């Protein structure tokens, strides 16, 4: 089962793996043609009602595989308004090969022929809401027809995720859907065929550019704030995390740090707001004020960078998580307290392989071995009850149910500080996305930022964690040159 949103991500990941949309459309069209053959004998009349997107493109391909049938293709709209290059190419191919085609500029001009099979390819899984014209009138006419109706991927007007329809929707007899079943199809009175169109399993298993689609297309979080509780023995770690959160979409980034090191942290970047508290390290008595600040402003907390592992600091970290009920990324020195704490907070934990073992997770013998132990990380995340983003050569992300692997990155990322940028990036994304999705996107973005630095500098060593900061926005939101 796969949602329409996840399907779009998988399509994009498949293209990044070298399986382009054009190739998938060819396979999808072939699958539609097979469905027609299952219900009609050669010589039967088939009418294809195609929209101007890739859903219509699938049916345009299908027409080429149905030469033994009497096929007519009815495009809803003018050909010059076809929205994708590959759909337009397939329309042009039909025209040049003298297939029976027509452009329907006005829904009042749509006249469906007397036929045995009607193919509904107006709108696909990515379109929701009530049908507009000319699709609404076309759906009504399809529903009044006596032909067997085959819908491509989902009946037009039906929400693929819920099965609901706002107003008129095509009443299909059969649905041929691609790669995996969509949740809403179970609610339909139709026979559903799931067609394998050649999307590799890796497109779902590995995090790729498709996983960044939600952040690229979704609304920005309003008033997103990051609150880094870190510093003490170390000053660079909280500064890197706080700056990465800004690069990942936070509007403001605060650092709560001990008074003696607060000026040093402020000195890293004028964009940071550093709030000093008394003492040389985080201790339990400072926790109530920190929790109150974080919850008052609905901050996404990053707990751990540079805190140190003094006994009173670990006690304070545990106390913070026990009292905090918001969203937090737990990293570095704060990680060991997570398994023992009872918390209402929503946590994303970002351990390296050694920190993972200290938390009670699997012992991973080398950075290269983590991905091969992904099932054990999943089991650990399930027991822990929180999202785990385990860092190594390939990162493993799991919420105990879903598990993905991010292969983005470069060998230079073994340098200190890249885990801090990852924690901050996760926090910036966690303001607007669910924890698992945020962790997947952050792992990919942090690694992709390192790749961009390498590409620009032709660098094969000497990477600094601070180099990633400038590249993070392009890794997250894309680049006109990509």
Image: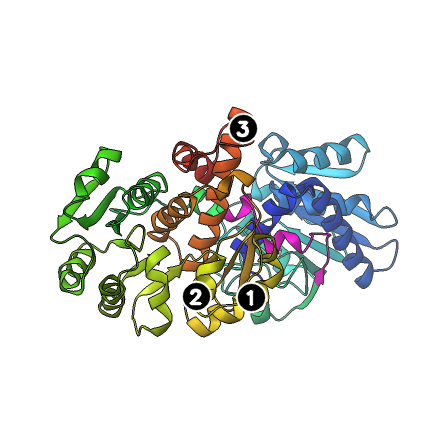
Q: State the count of labels.
A: 3
Q: What residue sits right under mark 2 in the picture?
A: 358
Dot 2 surroundings within 10 Å: few (below 14), some, or many (20 or more)?
some
Q: Earlier in the sequence, mark 1 or mark 3?
A: 1
Label 3: element kind = loop
Which quadrant of the figure contains the N terminus? bottom right
Which stretch appears magenta? Answer: 194-211
Residue 124 position, x and y percent, is: 58, 51
Of the two numbered discs 3 and 2 on the same chain, state the one appearing first in sequence.
2
Q: Residue beneath label 3, please?
A: 459
Closer to the eye: label 1 or 2: 2
Compared across the picture, whether 465 is left or right of 32 comes to left
Mark nearest the camera among 1 and 3 is: 3
* Towards the viewer: 188 or 465: 465
Q: Which element type, helix, strand or loop, lies under badge 1?
A: helix
Residue underneath mark 1: 183
**Position of residue 14 measured from the top left corner of the image (x, y, whole percent):** 64, 46
Position in image of residue 301 (x %, y %): 28, 55
196 part of magenta stretch: yes
Determine whether 174 is above or below 18 in the image: below
Q: Tell me the distance, in whole angstroms, between the alpha carbons under discs 3 and 2.
A: 34 Å
């Amino acid at each position: 089962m796969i949602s329409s949103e996840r399907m779009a991500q998988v399509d994009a990941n498949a293209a990044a793996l070298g399986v382009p949309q054009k190739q998938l459309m060819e396979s999808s069209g072939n699958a539609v043609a097979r469905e027609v053959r299952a219900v009609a004998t050669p010589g039967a009349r088939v009418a294809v009602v195609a929209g101007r997107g890739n859903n219509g493109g699938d049916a345009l391909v299908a027409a080429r595989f149905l030469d033994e049938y009497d096929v007519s293709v009815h495009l809803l709209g003018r050909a010059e308004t076809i929205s994708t290059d590959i759909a337009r190419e397939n329309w042009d191919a039909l025209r040049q090969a003298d297939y029976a085609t027509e452009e329907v500029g006005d829904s009042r001009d749509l006249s469906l022929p007397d036929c045995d099979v009607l193919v509904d390819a107006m709108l696909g899984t990515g379109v929701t809401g009530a049908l507009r014209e000319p699709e609404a009138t076309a759906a009504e006419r399809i529903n009044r027809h006596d032909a067997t109706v085959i819908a491509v991927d989902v009946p037009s007007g039906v929400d693929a995720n819920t099965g609901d329809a706002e107003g008129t929707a095509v009443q299909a007899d059969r649905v041929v859907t691609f790669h995996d079943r969509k949740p809403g199809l179970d609610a339909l009175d139709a026979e559903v065929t799931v067609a394998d169109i050649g999307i590799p399993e890796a497109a779902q298993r590995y995090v790729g550019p498709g996983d960044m689609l939600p952040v690229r297309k979704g609304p920005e979080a309003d008033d997103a704030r990051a609150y880094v509780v870190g510093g003490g023995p170390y000053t660079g770690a909280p500064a890197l995390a706080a700056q990465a959160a800004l690069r990942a979409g936070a509007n403001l980034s605060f650092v709560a740090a001990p008074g003696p090191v607060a000026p040093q942290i402020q000195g890293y970047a004028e964009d940071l707001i550093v709030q000093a508290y008394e003492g040389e390290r985080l201790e339990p008595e400072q926790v109530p004020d920190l929790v109150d600040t974080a919850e008052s402003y609905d901050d996404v907390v990053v707990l751990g960078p540079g805190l140190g592992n003094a006994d009173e600091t670990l006690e304070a970290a545990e106390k913070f998580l026990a009292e905090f009920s918001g969203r937090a990324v737990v990293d570095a020195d704060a990680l060991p307290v997570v398994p023992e704490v009872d918390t209402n907070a929503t946590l994303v934990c970002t351990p390296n392989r050694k920190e993972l073992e200290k938390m009670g997770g699997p012992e991973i013998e080398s950075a290269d071995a983590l991905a091969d132990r992904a099932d054990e990380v999943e089991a650990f995340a399930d027991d822990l009850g929180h999202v785990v983003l385990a860092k190594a050569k390939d990162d493993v992300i799991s919420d105990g149910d879903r598990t993905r692997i991010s292969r983005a990155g470069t060998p230079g990322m073994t340098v200190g500080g890249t885990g801090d940028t990852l924690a901050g990036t996760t926090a910036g994304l966690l303001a607007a996305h669910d924890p698992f999705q945020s962790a997947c996107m952050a792992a990919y973005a942090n690694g992709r930022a390192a790749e961009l630095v390498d590409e620009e500098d032709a660098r094969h060593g000497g990477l600094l964690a601070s180099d990633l900061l400038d590249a993070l926005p392009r890794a997250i939101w894309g680049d006109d040159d990509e």
